[in-house]
Image (cartoon, grey):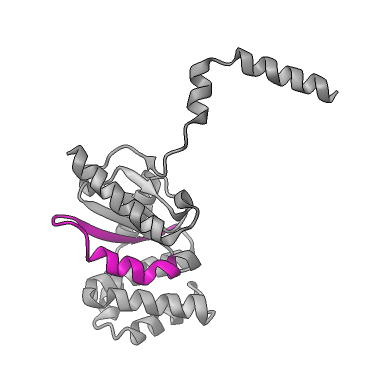
Amino acid sequence: MKKFIVQMAMAAVLATPVLSIAQELQPSLPYREVSAQAEDSHKVVVFFSFACPVCASYDQTFSRWAKTLPPGWSAEFIPVAVPDKGNYLAARAFFAVQDADPNRVAAFMSAAYTLIQQNGMTMEDPGTWSRAVAMANVQGFNEAWHNVTQQRLERAFAKLLTYGVDATPSMVISGKYVITPDDVSGDSALYMNLANGMISKVMQER
């Protein structure tokens, strides 16, 4: 039986076109290309979730790296606004902080990660967000919270679908290339090098 299987396998290989074999032997690219979105052509869009421990581990790295982008480029952080209570509250809180006190966004994100990842608080608990706001000394949060519209949350979710993001953290480079830590076997330094390389690739293509 084993010999028969081997013979059948050899026959299948011999019947396979040489080009197909060559394509299969080529290493897979460390990124996924999607239909280009012009509105993000000079951005790095970072999709994240406060419930994601890997996102938490990249928090300070992303914050520092965003400040080193080439002239004309910007980083946009988008919470995974899937329609459930925890992610809804998290996204609404993030956008409220972004509107009310943008200079405190990084501090708020760090506080939220600490409360959820280290202190065991949940995204479903409104107290998580009020405490994170207090820890980060965010001003004007309550008014901004009430001004975050459902449409804004839906746009964040739509962008998630547009790029086919199914893991966090994911970065979308220039509205065209999607990368995740899985593309580099979880190596954080290599992931950031990949992001820089993709930006260079885009700039060379223009």
Q: Is residue 77 magenta?
A: yes
Question: Camera-side residue: 188 or 168?
Answer: 188
Q: Is residue 101 magenta?
A: no
In the image, residue 128 above or below residue 99: below
Question: Camera-side residue: 189 or 128?
Answer: 189
In the image, residue 170 above or below residue 51: above
Q: Position of residue 53 (x, y in %)?
A: 49, 68
Q: Position of residue 73 (x, y in %)?
A: 18, 55
Splitting the image into 4 quarters, where does residue 7 fall? top right
Q: Which residues are magenta?
A: 55-82
In the image, residue 125 above or below residue 71: below
Question: Camera-side residue: 111 or 9?
Answer: 9
Residue located at (29% from left, 72% from top) = 96
Quadrant containing the C terminus is: top left
Q: Position of residue 34 (x, y in %)?
A: 35, 39
Residue 18, visible in the rendered structure: yes
